[in-house]
Image (cartoon, helix red, strand yellow):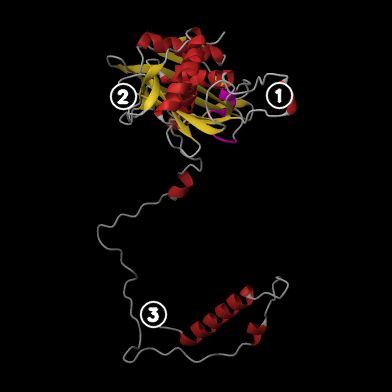
C-alpha cells in the first residue's frame, strides 16, 4: 500500500518555495540578496484530500501496456550539424539546378567536349592535381586546406583545421544542347595526432566544390563575351520604336554589346554619368549649364554637351526587344519620355559615336 505522507510533503513544498523565492531576490545594485528566513519557517496546514478520497492504491507496480517497444538512443539534437545548409549558387545564363538527383547536379547549356575544356581550365587555374577517368569524368587528388588557395582553405567544415578532400566532376546526362554536371565528394580526412583520419564525406562539401566551378565558368564566359564585344565594338543604330511604341534608337546587337559601350559613348558626348544600374538596365547622365563666364569668350568650352539637350538630368534605358536586338529610350529627370522631336534631334550624334567604336 502506498500512502500519502502529508506532513512530510507540506514541509518539502514549503522549503522548495522558500528556496526559489530567495534565489530570485536581488538587492538594489543587482547583486543577490540571500534570504535565509526559510530556516525558521513554520509548518503550514496539513494537505487536505478531496471529500471521499482516502488513499491511493497501486498494485504490482506500474505496468507497461502490452506491445510497447522501448528503445535506448541518443537525442537527435546531438547528431545534427550546427553548420548552415549549403545551396548551389547558380549565376549567369544557361545554368540551372537539377533537384531530382541525389548528388549535387546542374544543367549547363553547352556540349560535353566544351564543358570538359572549361573543367580542365578550372583545375589548372586552381593549381589542382587531377586525372581523367573516362571521357567525361575528372577526379582530383587530395585538396588540402594548407595549399594556399581560397578554394582549398574554404572547403569542408567551418573553423576546422587540417582537412583534405577528393572530388569528382562528371557529366552524367546529355540533351541536344545541355549537359548535366554532377559533383561527388569522394573522400575526406582530418589530421589528428600526427596522422590523417578518414571522416565522413558530405553533399554539403560537394556543393561547395561545384559552386566554385560554376563561379569560374560564369566569370570566364562573361570575360570571353566582353572580349568578343571589344573586337566588334562598333554598334549600328537607327531610328525605330521600342516595344511600347515610343520613338527610340534600335540595333540588332545583343544587350551586353550595347551596355559595354554606353559609358564610352556618353563620356565622348560630354554627358556626365551620375549613376548606372545594371539590374534596371539604365544609365543616368547630366547636361551641364554652359559656361557664361568672362573667359568663355576667348576659349571654347570643351566640356559642353555635344548633343542638343537642355541642361538638367536625364536617363537612357536599354530594353531587349521581343523581336531581337536592343532599344535605347530617353527620359527626363521626372521619368517622362522625351518627345519625338528631341529624339530626332539628338539621334545623329549618338549614332555616329556608336559607329566610331573603341579606338
Label 2: few (<14), some (14–19) or many (≥20) C-alpha neighbours in 10 Å = few
Residue placed under numbered mark 2 in the picture: 322
The earlier-in-sequence mark between 1 and 2 is 1
Residue 260 is situated, as x and y percent measured from the top left of the image, at 50, 19
- Quadrant (top left, top right, bottom left, bottom right) of the C terminus: top right
Q: In percent of the image, x 63 and y 77: which residue is there?
A: 22
Question: How far apart are the alpha carbons under marks 1 and 2?
Answer: 48 Å
Q: What residue did someone put label 3 on?
A: 2
Give the residue at x 52% y 16%.
141
Residue that carries the numbered disc 1 in the rendered image: 296
Write down the quadrant of residue 23 in the picture.
Answer: bottom right
Q: Which mark is residue 203?
A: none
Q: Quadrant of residue 298?
A: top right
Q: Residue at x 57, y 25 (%)?
A: 271
State which quarter of the image contains the N terminus.
bottom left
Q: Is residue 170 above or below residue 113?
A: below
Specify start and end residues of the magenta stretch as a single range.
150-159
Q: Is residue 67 left or right of residue 110?
A: left
- The mark nearer the N terminus, 2 or 3, is 3
Q: Is residue 329 visible?
A: no
Residue 297 position, x and y percent, is 71, 22
Amino acid at each position: 500500500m502506498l500512502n500519502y505522507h502529508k506532513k512530510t510533503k507540506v514541509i518539502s513544498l514549503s522549503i522548495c518555495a522558500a528556496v526559489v523565492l530567495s534565489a530570485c531576490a536581488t538587492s538594489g545594485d543587482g547583486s543577490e540578496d540571500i534570504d535565509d528566513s526559510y530556516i525558521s519557517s513554520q509548518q503550514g496546514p496539513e494537505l487536505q484530500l478531496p471529500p471521499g478520497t482516502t488513499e491511493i492504491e497501486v498494485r504490482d507496480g506500474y505496468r507497461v501496456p502490452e506491445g510497447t517497444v522501448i528503445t535506448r538512443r541518443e537525442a537527435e539534437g546531438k547528431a545534427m550539424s550546427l553548420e548552415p545548409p549549403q545551396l548551389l549558387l547558380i549565376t549567369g545564363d544557361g545554368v540551372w539546378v537539377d533537384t531530382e538527383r541525389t548528388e549535387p547536379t546542374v544543367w549547363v547549356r553547352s556540349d560535353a567536349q566544351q564543358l570538359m575544356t572549361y573543367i580542365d581550365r578550372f583545375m589548372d587555374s586552381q593549381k589542382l592535381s587531377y586525372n581523367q577517368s573516362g571521357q567525361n569524368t575528372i577526379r582530383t587528388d587530395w585538396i588540402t586546406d594548407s595549399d594556399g588557395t581560397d578554394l582549398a582553405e574554404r572547403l569542408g567544415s567551418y573553423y576546422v583545421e587540417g582537412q583534405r578532400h577528393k572530388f569528382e566532376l562528371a557529366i552524367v546526362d546529355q540533351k541536344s544542347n545541355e549537359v548535366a554536371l554532377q559533383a561527388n565528394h569522394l573522400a575526406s580526412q582530418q589530421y589528428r595526432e600526427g596522422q590523417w583520419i578518414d571522416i565522413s564525406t558530405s553533399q554539403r562539401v560537394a556543393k561547395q566544390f561545384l559552386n566554385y566551378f560554376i563561379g569560374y565558368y560564369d566569370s570566364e564566359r562573361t570575360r570571353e563575351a566582353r572580349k568578343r564585344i571589344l573586337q566588334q565594338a562598333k554598334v549600328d543604330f537607327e531610328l525605330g520604336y521600342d516595344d511600347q511604341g515610343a520613338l527610340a534608337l534600335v540595333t540588332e546587337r545583343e544587350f551586353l554589346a550595347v551596355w559595354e559601350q554606353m559609358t564610352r559613348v556618353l563620356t565622348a558626348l560630354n554627358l556626365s554619368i551620375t549613376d548606372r544600374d545594371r539590374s534596371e538596365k539604365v544609365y543616368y547622365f547630366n547636361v551641364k549649364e554652359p559656361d557664361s563666364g568672362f573667359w568663355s569668350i576667348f576659349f571654347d568650352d570643351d566640356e559642353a554637351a555635344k548633343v542638343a539637350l537642355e541642361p538638367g538630368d536625364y536617363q537612357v534605358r536599354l530594353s531587349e526587344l521581343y523581336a531581337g536586338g536592343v532599344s535605347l529610350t530617353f527620359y527626363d529627370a521626372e521619368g517622362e519620355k522625351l518627345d519625338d522631336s528631341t529624339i530626332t534631334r539628338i539621334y545623329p550624334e549618338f549614332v555616329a559615336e556608336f559607329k566610331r567604336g573603341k579606338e
